[in-house]
Each structure stands twice: as C-alpha cells, then as structure tokens.
Amino acid sequence: MKTQRPFLALASGLALLLTACALPTAPLPQDTVYAVTRQHELIRFKADRPQQLIDRRALSGLAPGDSLRGIDYRVARGVLYALADSGRLYTVDTAQARLVPVATSAPASWPVQGGVSGFDFNPTVDRIRVVSSSAQNLRLHPETNAVVDGSPAEPGLQLDGALHYVAGDRHAGRTPDLAGVAYTYNKKNEKITTNYAIDRALGALLMQGSAEGAEPVVSPNTGQLRTVGLLGTGPLAEAHFDISDIANTALLAARLAGQTQTRLYRLDLASGRATELGVIGQGEPLAGLAIEP
C-alpha cells in the first residue's frame, strides 16, 4: 500500500492539471462595434477581430470648427448619436456616414471646461450622461440638445454634482480623471441601471452612483465615485468605453500611457480586469466607441 501512494498522488495531480486545462474559456464577444477616428472617419469592426475593419468612411455634415468627442447608441430608437466639443449633438446615419445636427445650433452656453471625456445614454430615462476632464458631471436632452438643469429650484443653470471619490474609497481625496462612461441594461427591470466609468490616470474601473438594485439608491447625478478595481493595464493616454444592451458586454478602446496604438479590451464589470482583444484597425487615435444594439 505504501508503494502505491506516490503513484496515486501523481495520478491525482495529473488529473487535476488536465481538468484545469480543459476548463472552458469565455467566448470572444461577437458584437459589431462602431468607432470614430480623430480624423472623423467612421469605422466598423467585430469585437473578436478589431484589426479587420469592415469599412472605413469619411463622415460628412460636421459643422465648421466642430470636433467629435464621443458616440453612443440611443438604444430606445436604435440611432447612433455623436457629441462635438462645442456641445452640439448629431445623429449619425451609419449607412451614409452622415452627421445630422439634432438642433439648429449648439447650446448657447456650453458649460464644459477641459473638454468632454465621457458620453453615454442612460437607458432608464433616455438622457445623455456627459463628464469632463475637469470633473464636471451633466446631462443632455437627446431631442433638444439642451443641458438638463441639475437643480431647477436654484437660479441659473446648475450642473449635476461634481465628480469625486466617496469617503472611505481607496482613492478618496484624489481628483478623478474620467475618460469614458457607460450604463448597463437590465432585461428584468428596465427602470434600473448601473453607471460605470474609467479613471484614465489610475487605469481603473469605477462605479458612478450605486449598483442597480442596491439600497439606498445613489444617483449618478451626485457625482459619487466608487472604485471597482484596477484594469491591470496601468495608466491610459486614451479611453473610450461602452456596454452592450444584449449581454452587458463591456468594451474599452484604450491607448496605454507611452504607447502609440489603440487597442480593444473586454472588461470584467465585477473586478475591473481588462482582457486584450487586439489592435483596432491601424491603431490610430479615436474620438469615440459604440456597440451596435
């Protein structure tokens, strides 16, 4: 019996190793993704092979002086929207690569300082979340292009609460550097969602407000940020973020600090960890990313 024990232990170890090797890996996402380059080209690709572009077309219809700073789908209507640095909203005709202004003019008083760094539709209320590199936090109306007043009882236009890490968070007291926001989609209860964000300087996934279903409910309008976890990439020079409405697949287009190519990553919303999927197209800088519904 004693002479059999080493053999049994070895056999058991090999069995465990083979079992571990046989564990299934998460399938690659099959989503179709649109992105806008800094040269205002609309590109399209599949998430599992981002380097193989389906098409690349120059966008038309951009107002003189405007530069795009984000894109996202209004899932309720199936329409792609774009936001320019002037505050002007556009719809995007993806078949024609054409931009159409939502309103006759950009907002008369565009309050964003430091530039737009995040842009995403809240599916529960059909409003657009916008964050800036100077920690501003606001909403836009998709039909009128107007900035939503965060406190109508006060005189003048009030933005939502400034972005800040909550007391007790590992990054409390640090100025956030958000570059990308995205909302989840709850198929069982369309009235709840979670607002996630990316801190570019930290290379971290954050939650803005509370998680869907959590009590007490903390609105993203408060600007409260909580760290979910580090991406594992280090600091980012560029980040564009979206979550699909079908399976809540989280995709991040990012260029790491000190690197020259923009790559696509899949994020684990529970831990924040990023898994690289490949270089996007030729790796050029982007102005926005959106997953097709």
Image (cartoon, rainbow, N blue to C red):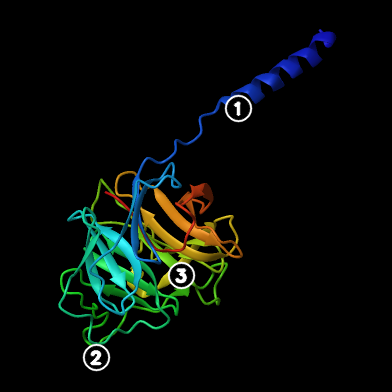
Residue 187 appears in the rendering: yes
Q: Position of residue 31 (x, y in %)?
A: 35, 44
Q: Which mark is residue 178?
A: 3
User: What type is the residue that disc 3 sits on?
Assistant: Leu
Q: Which mark is residue 21?
A: 1
Quote the CA–CA distance across marks 2 and 3.
26 Å
Q: Quadrant of residue 12?
A: top right
Q: Position of residue 143 (x, y in %)?
A: 16, 69
Quote the CA–CA distance across marks 2 and 1.
62 Å
Q: Is residue 187 above or below residue 252?
A: above
Which residue appears at 69% of the width and 20% of the height? Answer: 14
Which residue appears at 45% of the width and 67% of the height? Answer: 179
Q: Which element type, helix, strand or loop, lies under badge 1?
A: helix
Q: Which element type, helix, strand or loop, lies under badge 3?
A: strand
Q: On the picture, is 96 further left or further right than 213?
A: left
Q: Quadrant of residue 110?
A: bottom left
Which residue appears at 39% of the width and 83% of the height? Answer: 113
Q: Which residue is mark 2?
A: 156
Residue 217 appears in the rendering: no
Q: Residues within 10 Å of mark 2 (few under 14, many from 20)?
A: few
User: What type is the residue that disc 2 sits on?
Assistant: Gly
